[in-house]
Amino acid sequence: MQSAPFTLELCCADIHSVQTAECYDVPAIELCTDLSCGGLSPSLGLMRQSRKLFTGELGMLIRPRKGNFCYSPLEQQVMLDELAAACDEGADFLVLGCLLKDGDLDRKLMERLVVRSNGIPLTFHRAFDVSPQPELLLNQLMEMQIDRILSGGGCARALDGIENLSRWQVISGKSIEWVAAGSIDHTQVQQIVSATGIRRIHCALRRKTKQTLQPIQLGSPDEIDSTSLRAILEVKF
């Protein structure tokens, strides 16, 4: 059981990681695939089996491809279909985001996603951190009553974005729940929580694997490192 005053949201990119999260009684996970690019939408099979396996709060990422967060009409339809599938498969929350070419919120697409979500809580993902006007974007998301924002404070590492996270937390008050993200491990949780007041911590904790020589590049598994997971669950304040 967790002994620290924060909620761990574990990023799980395969079914074995979901199984590990269940075994360690992790309170929440974000389900996705391919952590090498920050995560993509999980398959229907992964959604379905994860919901059968995991008894905690299950979030599902809606991101149809690698690259930026500016989506074509075809990609938007893919997102809407993926979102509908996630809802049908029992998602407790959805993680998504969309921007225009100038980095502003794609409000039209976001409104369509909100409608299709049928009231399931929404987290605006780290597209927030690439916006050139994050505080304007924050105000827009507050107007749309988005539930959470996943952010590293505009930085790759949450530890480097503490000042921004603290300021944005004050601006949003109780209208947005912030989720700190960005290369967080057990050595950083106390500082981030204490400095920002953010009580939800998002971690990937991917196990490092040695590359084997292959005639073709096959990529690396995204399985959770159990040792790192135990360490963060044992953090005490």
Image (cartoon, rainbow, N blue to C red):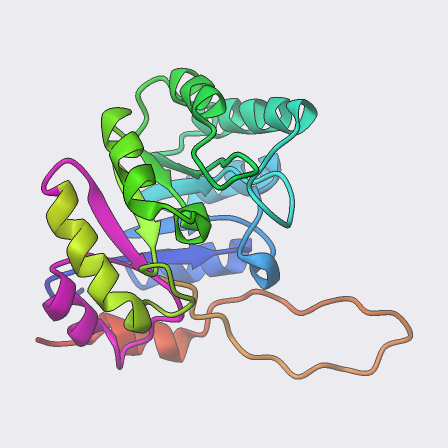
Q: Which residues are magenta?
A: 173-202
Q: Nearer the viewer, residue 145 or 231?
A: 145
Residue 198 drawn in magenta: yes
Is residue 56 visible from the viewing direction of this image? no
Quadrant position of the N terminus in the picture = bottom left
x, y percent for residue 226: 41, 74
Residue 133 drawn in magenta: no
Establish if 213 lies above or below 166.
Answer: below
Q: Quadrant of residue 214?
A: bottom right
* Residue furthest out toward the right: 215
x, y percent for residue 154: 37, 59
Establish if 204 lies above or below 170.
Answer: below
Instruction: Determine whether, in the image, residue 215 is placed left or right of residue 60.
Output: right
Establish if 140 lies above or below 11.
Answer: above
Establish if 177 lies above or below 204.
Answer: above
Q: Nearer the viewer, residue 153 or 119?
A: 153
Q: Quadrant of residue 149?
A: top left
Q: Quadrant of residue 190?
A: bottom left
For image coordinates 31% across by 59% down, the residue present is: 153
Instruction: Determine whether, in the image, residue 80 is placed left or right of residue 201.
Output: right
For image coordinates 61% across by 40% down, the residue present is: 43
Q: Nearer the viewer, residue 34 or 137?
A: 137
x, y percent for residue 73: 65, 22
Instruction: Determine whether, in the image, residue 211 is placed left or right of residue 92.
Output: right
Quadrant position of the C terminus in the picture = bottom left
